[in-house]
Amino acid sequence: MSLNFGMRCSTVLPSKPTLTEQNLPDQKGKVFLVTGASGGLGKLLVNILYRQNGKVYLAARSQSKTDEVIREIRSAHPTSTGELHFLHLELDDLATIKKAANRFLEKESRLDVLWNNAGVMIPPEGSKTKQGYELQYGVNNIAHFLLVLFLRPALEAAAALAPKNSVRVIWVASSAADAAPNPAVDLTNMDYHREEGAWMKYSRSKAASVIHSAEFARRTKGTAIISLALNPGNFVTNLQQNMSKMELAMFKLISSDPINGAYTELFAGLSDTITEENNGGWVSPFGKVEKVRKDFVEPELGGKFWDWTMAQFDHPSIPVARTLSNNDSMALRTLIVGGTSGIGLALARHIAAASPEAFVTVCGRTKPANLPSNIEFSPIEATLMRGIKQWTDNFKDTLAGRQIDLLVLSQGTSNFTGRDETKEGIDRKMALHYYGRQLIVRELDPVLKQDAKILFILNGKEGSPAHINWNDLDLKISYSMSTAAKQSATMLDIMVQHYAAAQKEKGNDKRHYAHVYPGGVLTGLTRTWPWYMRAGVKMVGPLVAVKPETCAQLLLANLEKVTSAREKDGQFWSNINNEGCVIKDKAVWNQSQRKCLAEHTWRTIDIALG
């Protein structure tokens, strides 16, 4: 056993609470989720959060019991402008976790703090989850791990907008975690075929959460999410309901008022003294950051335990979401054209960091510096149709039968020159922003998965019937910088609807086509501008624009939610804004308009190809 003196001492001699309802700032605008919120420390924590105007989701099994708690808390704080919502969650059945997460994600696009508070302690001998896991391991650790994976998009969306270090995942452990031996999890005995005592099983389940907290911190580095494990202290709550009378009597001797445990959780979730330096760390009673046991945060054990846990979700009764941003076990294949800088590169880095087993290819003229090992570079001349055709032929050969899950087309340019034709007779801006993108989609069609997502990043907000000249689609007569930008955006709007309609006619409406409006983003596209304009952007840009990394986080965090909602309505195309949400009231183009543009597009491209 590898004991940690600090972890043990803080349980017997806890520090005084430093964050309580008396000095907690207003929480208006924040969204919280607390598991096990119908009683014990969870109920006390929710009471404080609501008192300070927070919106709180109470995740619990019993709606009637939780509704009574909600009425009680609302009655206690009649002037609060916060919100309380019941969220049905059964942690002893992993098959229900996705449903609970989806219900939350249908209502909220962000989650500021997730408290994994619920737990069981010393249940009757032989107690198991629906999937056959020892009940304490299943509820205290495995189910919460899965919940975190499903809610990660909402956490990342909040992290992209919220103050630094404020978005957190809190794993409520126990002083019992330190009683676990080294190694704290025995991967050769996870089913306990070698029997261990009830208290040891409880200790291992709590230590497991500390290990997952540290590993989650490592795997989400760079997303601005803070992950912390904690020991709330010793209290008599409904958690001790299965103790014997003797055990309970002894436990009461070292127990204190449960409100102090809520203060510990409050500190971990909302104290502004916690920073990135504490990520993956340990909070002791009643609100103090301390060093965690070294073997709990050791990367080798953390990685192996993470992989073991992920492997459990291949069980046929557990519908794990295979989404772009929350499943590290899925080897997604992503191709980003124009991914050598700006938004494209930020997307590539984000996907590669979130899913280490993913395959990401970025294409452009120049290879970016310091690419992670799971991002490949492929050179392409994206202004020439012949160059694109040659590149797509070669790229398809390299796939060796594998298919693409996500295709992102973000190539572009920004300059103040007039119409600048390539040697193929196409304006250079329109070749990058429109024609080249269509050729890539056409040529890669055979290697796109049936349910692939295709994203055109340009200006999904600008397209409009007023912004297209049907008599001069390639703008040989009426060209200007403004008309080229508006016409290209409108033509992309029409083509995403064309692709969606075409696949529906073939009875294969599974792919999703989206035109994305990234908003003001600080990219390198201004490098060709006059010096005085670059100087202006340098001064004003940070005030009105966001970093590419923020744009990438918002888009990926909400992509699955947005596309799923549209597909439920039978729509396999979307226009997405800079917050990762659907742009409503976009023009719907009729079949004649879609056909006219498609015929023009393929004719122009085929002429260029010769």
Image (cartoon, rainbow, N blue to C red):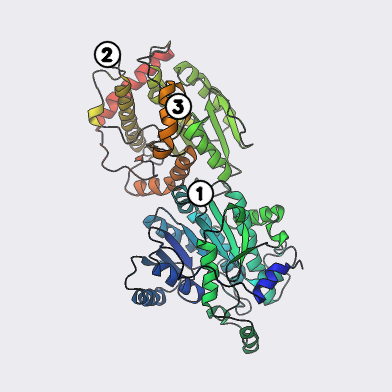
Return the residue nearer the eye: 571 or 351: 351
Q: Which image quadrant is residue 99 in?
A: bottom left
SS category of the residue bearing label 1: loop
SS category of the residue bearing label 2: loop
Q: Amino acid at mark 3?
A: Leu
Q: Amino acid at mark 1?
A: Arg
Question: Does any portion of residue 53 appear in the rendered image?
Answer: yes
Q: CA distance from mark 3 to mark 2?
A: 26 Å
Q: Which residue is mark 3?
A: 525
Left or right: where does residue 402 sit relative to residue 604?
right
Q: Amino acid at mark 2?
A: Ile
Q: Which image quadrant is residue 4 in?
A: bottom right
Q: Which residue is mark 2?
A: 477
* Mark 2 crowd level (few <14, some 14–19, many ≥20, 10 Å Cα): few
User: Where is residue 246 shown, x and y percent of the image?
Assistant: 65, 89
Asked whether disc 3 touches disc 1, contact meaning CB atoms under 8 Å apart, the reply is no
User: Where is residue 491 shown, x and y percent of the image?
Assistant: 32, 27
Quarter of the image that includes the N terminus? bottom right
Of label 3 and label 1, which has the lower sequence position? Answer: 1
Q: Which residue is mark 1?
A: 322
Return the residue nearer the eye: 510 or 184: 184
Q: CA distance from mark 3 to mark 1?
A: 34 Å
User: Where is residue 283 shown, x and y percent of the image?
Assistant: 61, 65
* Mark 3 crowd level (few <14, some 14–19, many ≥20, 10 Å Cα): some
User: Where is residue 455 shown, x and y percent of the image?
Assistant: 42, 36
Q: Is residue 426 above or below residue 340?
A: above
Q: Is residue 101 above or below residue 539?
A: below
Return the residue nearer the eye: 17 or 449: 17
Q: CA distance from mark 1 to mark 2?
A: 48 Å
